[in-house]
Amino acid sequence: MNSPLTPAQDAALVAAIRQAEVMTSGEIRVHLEDTCPTPEPLDRAAQVFAELNMHKTAARNGVLFYLAWKSRQFAVVGDAAINSAVSDDFWETTKETVLAQFRTGNYVLGLERGIKMVGEQLQRHFPYNATTDQNELDDAISIGGSTPSADA
């Protein structure tokens, strides 16, 4: 799959991730694929979360934004520690903020706003510690699915 993002859009999302992670030990990733291979995008987001080893962060505070852009499906999922730290409605509020922009065709802006919201919560609950924190996960946008290639 080729990225639906222009190089400038990709760079803007990576910059948003880096800005959100500046003052936190938390980790944020964005994953894009054409279509969601599962009936529920949240289920697929959980699969991708595991495939990207996001559950292996030291503080269990990774967050994944998942978008199947052709099938127009979206989910945001967080690891155990961030899930237990945020309010019960946080994920739904974040999802709705992102989707409000998606509905008007502003996909990058929607993701940027969601990333900022998540970053604020990560900073609040998991502040950066210069002595121990490091960037544990790649900030690059991951592309594609788990569909086996013809060579497999």
Image (spheres, rainbow, N blue to C red):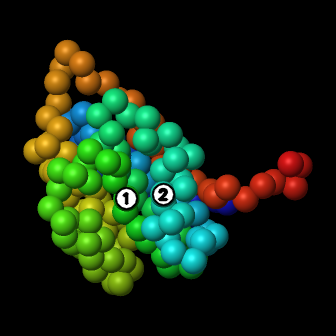
Q: Tag 2 or tag 1, which sits nearer the N-term?
A: 2
Which element is circle 1 on?
strand
Indicate the position of residue 33 as horizontal and vertical percent values: 58, 63
Position of 15 with respect to 140 (left or right) is left
Q: Which residue is denoted by mark 2 in the rendering?
A: 46
- The image quadrant where one finds the N terminus is bottom right
Whether 116 is drawn above or below 124: the answer is: below
Instruction: Measure how far apart labels 1 and 2 are at the Cα level.
Output: 7 Å
Q: Which residue is denoted by mark 1 in the rendering?
A: 77
> What residue lies at 67% left-to-right and 55% top-to-bottom?
146
Indicate the position of residue 12 as horizontal and vertical percent values: 35, 52
Indicate the position of residue 49 as horizontal and vertical percent values: 48, 50
Mark 1–mark 2 contact, CB under 8 Å? yes
Q: Amino acid at mark 1?
A: Val
Whether 57 is drawn above or below 150: the answer is: above
> What residue lies at 34% left-to-right and 53% top-to-bottom?
78
> What residue lies at 27% left-to-right and 76% top-to-bottom?
96
Q: Which class describes the residues within 10 Å of circle 2: few (<14), some (14-19), or many (20+)? A: many
Position of 102 with respect to 122 (left or right) is right
User: Is residue 77 visible to the viewer in this orientation of the structure?
Assistant: yes
Of residues 19 and 59, the one nearer the viewer is 59
